Image: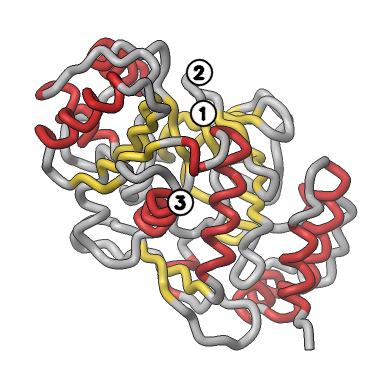
């Protein structure tokens, strides 16, 4: 018998415009309101259990901190795996139970290939120290899948900078399409030690300075990396433990959402008051791929939206704990 969760996942394949996103988002809201005890309690305590939103922007979002201490599963099922955030010593980390790992991986693939082409046509090199050295990273799960689906020389690198430099030089000579995906502090270390003039290389940073180096403006970091690699722009990936969907920037600091993801900003003093496009505020995330957990999440980043599909991240709200995936300030 086909479950409601499976029906909704099938419908995600049909989300390709504002109307279809809105329709599926409203279906997911009703499904999670009735079958997610954490969300149900939240709606009751905020006197929003009986609301009937007319649009996805009317759907209440839960604080992202719920993923740290509460059961966020919609329905009753045993996780195949649990994604965890890196956090810092002394802080409680987020935990995102995963009902269907293959569904997560396929959703990440669709989002990536829509922006960068099919994985089998490119070489993906991943420089992810810190993430590789712990269990439960959704970023590592995604990168591992992409590496397996891309060309033979694709692979992970921990601290083998000299080996990575040799591979890049070889791929440059062969005129291969290459993406170097890396946590920001590791990309800076590599760029300082092994600069290479490779204009066709796509450098994609995932954020994450997190106490490794002094805080730098994103523009300063991107300029440093562009000079080291001779590239015209630095790309970025936006994702986090609590999400199944990603957004990508191709170098202008503006992220473009995948089909299953939308961003809006809210008033800092009123979590249920959304702001118009162009206004800076705290970020709400609407991730339709989170069908089995919670799709509607308010997070502790500041941002600004430009339209339904594009946004930028401006930094962290003061006094929020540091997360491994947080981006640098603009």
Quarter of the image with the N terminus in it:
bottom right
Q: Residue at x 48, y 73 (%)?
A: 97
As measured in the structure, the alpha-carbon distance from the residue carrying label 3 to the one carrying label 1 is: 22 Å
Return the residue at label 1.
249
Please say whether residue 47 is visible from this viewpoint: yes
Q: Residue at x 38, y 37 (%)?
A: 123
Q: Point out residue 56 in the picture as x, y percentages from the top left corner.
A: 79, 51
Q: Where 220 sits versus 204, above or below?
A: above
Q: Nearer the viewer, residue 8 or 178?
A: 178
Q: Nearer the viewer, residue 127 or 147?
A: 147
Callout in the foreground (3, 2): 3
Q: Point out residue 49 in the picture as x, y percentages from the top left corner.
A: 77, 71
Q: Point out residue 108 in the picture as x, y percentages from the top left corner.
A: 54, 51
Q: Nearer the viewer, residue 187 or 290?
A: 187
The reply to whether dot 3 and dot 2 touch (C-beta < 8 Å) is no
Between disc 3 and disc 2, whose residue precedes?
A: 3
As measured in the structure, the alpha-carbon distance from the residue carrying label 3 to the one carrying label 2 is: 28 Å
Q: Which mark is residue 252?
A: 2
Q: Which mark is residue 149?
A: 3
As measured in the structure, the alpha-carbon distance from the residue carrying label 1 to the one carrying label 2 is: 7 Å
The reply to whether dot 1 and dot 2 touch (C-beta < 8 Å) is yes
Q: Where 279 sits versus 34, above or below?
A: above
Disc 1 element: strand
Q: Point out residue 42 in the picture as x, y percentages from the top left corner.
A: 64, 71
Disc 2 element: loop
Quarter of the image with the C terminus in it:
top left
Between disc 3 and disc 1, whose residue precedes?
A: 3
Could you tell whether 158 is left or right of 179 in the image? Answer: left
What colour-coding does the image apply?
secondary structure
Disc 3 element: helix
Which quadrant of the view contains residue 267? top right
Q: Residue at x 61, y 63 (%)?
A: 290
């Amino acid at each position: 018998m086909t479950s409601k969760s499976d029906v909704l996942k099938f419908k995600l394949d049909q989300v390709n415009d504002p109307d279809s996103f809105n329709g599926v988002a409203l279906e997911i809201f009703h499904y999670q309101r009735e079958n997610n005890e954490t969300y149900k309690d939240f709606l009751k305590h905020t006197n929003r259990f009986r609301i009937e939103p007319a649009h996805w922007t009317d759907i209440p979002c839960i604080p992202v901190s719920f993923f740290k201490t509460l059961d966020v599963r919609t329905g009753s099922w045993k996780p195949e795996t649990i994604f965890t955030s890196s956090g810092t010593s002394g802080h409680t980390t987020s935990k995102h139970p995963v009902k269907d790992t293959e569904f997560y991986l396929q959703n990440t693939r669709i989002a990536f290939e829509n922006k960068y082409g099919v994985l089998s046509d490119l070489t993906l090199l991943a420089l992810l120290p810190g993430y590789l050295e712990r269990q439960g990273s959704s970023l590592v799960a995604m990168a591992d899948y992409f590496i397996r689906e891309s060309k033979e020389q694709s692979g992970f690198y921990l601290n083998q900078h000299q080996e990575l430099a040799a591979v890049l030089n070889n791929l440059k000579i062969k005129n291969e399409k290459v993406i170097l995906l890396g946590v920001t502090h590791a990309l800076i270390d590599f760029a300082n030690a092994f600069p290479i003039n490779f204009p066709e290389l796509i450098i994609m940073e995932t954020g994450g300075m997190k106490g490794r180096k002094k805080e730098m403006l994103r523009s300063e970091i991107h300029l440093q990396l562009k000079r080291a690699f001779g590239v015209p722009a630095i790309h970025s990936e936006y994702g986090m433990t609590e999400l199944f969907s990603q957004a990508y920037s191709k170098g202008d600091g503006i992220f473009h959402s995948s089909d299953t993801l939308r961003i809006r900003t809210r008033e800092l003093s009123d979590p249920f008051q959304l702001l118009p496009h162009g206004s800076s505020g705290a970020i709400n995330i609407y991730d339709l791929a989170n069908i089995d957990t919670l799709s509607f999440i308010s997070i502790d980043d500041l941002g600004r939206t430009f339209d339904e599909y594009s946004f930028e991240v401006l930094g962290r709200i003061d006094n929020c704990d540091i997360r491994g995936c947080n981006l640098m300030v603009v």
